[in-house]
Amino acid sequence: MFTLSDLRRYDGEDGQMYVAYRGKVYDVSSCPHWRSGIHENLHFPGQDLTSEFPDAPHGEEVFSFPCLQLIGYLADQ
């Protein structure tokens, strides 16, 4: 379980990047689109991206990509 405060610690500064979506926490550290520490110059690791997802040019299928690993859940949900 992660709180939003816990999630913010995984902002890529130490190489680990986590994001949350719909109450689930994913490790995106190995994903090519996150290697620069920011996704498409818009989204930062260490955050809940649920509210930003409707504007994404892709669907929820991205969460089935092998580079994303489900690692936990948001306790705040």
Image (cartoon, rainbow, N blue to C red):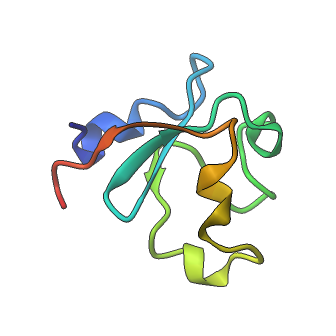
Task: Give coordinates of residue 32: x percent, y percent.
Answer: 83, 38
Residue at position x 57%, y 16% in the image: 14
Task: Give coordinates of residue 9: x percent, y percent.
Answer: 40, 30
Residue at position x 77%, y 77% in the image: 57
Residue that lies at the very extreme toward the top in this rendered image: 14
> Which quadrant of the structure image shows residue 5?
top left
Q: Is residue 21 left or right of residue 76?
A: right
Task: Give coordinates of residue 77: x percent, y percent.
Answer: 19, 61
Task: Give coordinates of residue 65: x percent, y percent.
Answer: 69, 47
Q: Nearer the viewer, residue 1 or 52?
A: 1
Q: Quadrant of the N terminus?
A: top left
How many marks on residues? 0
Q: Is residue 72 left or right of residue 3?
A: right
Q: Nearer the viewer, residue 35 or 21?
A: 21
Residue at position x 45%, y 69% in the image: 50
Residue at position x 71%, y 62% in the image: 42
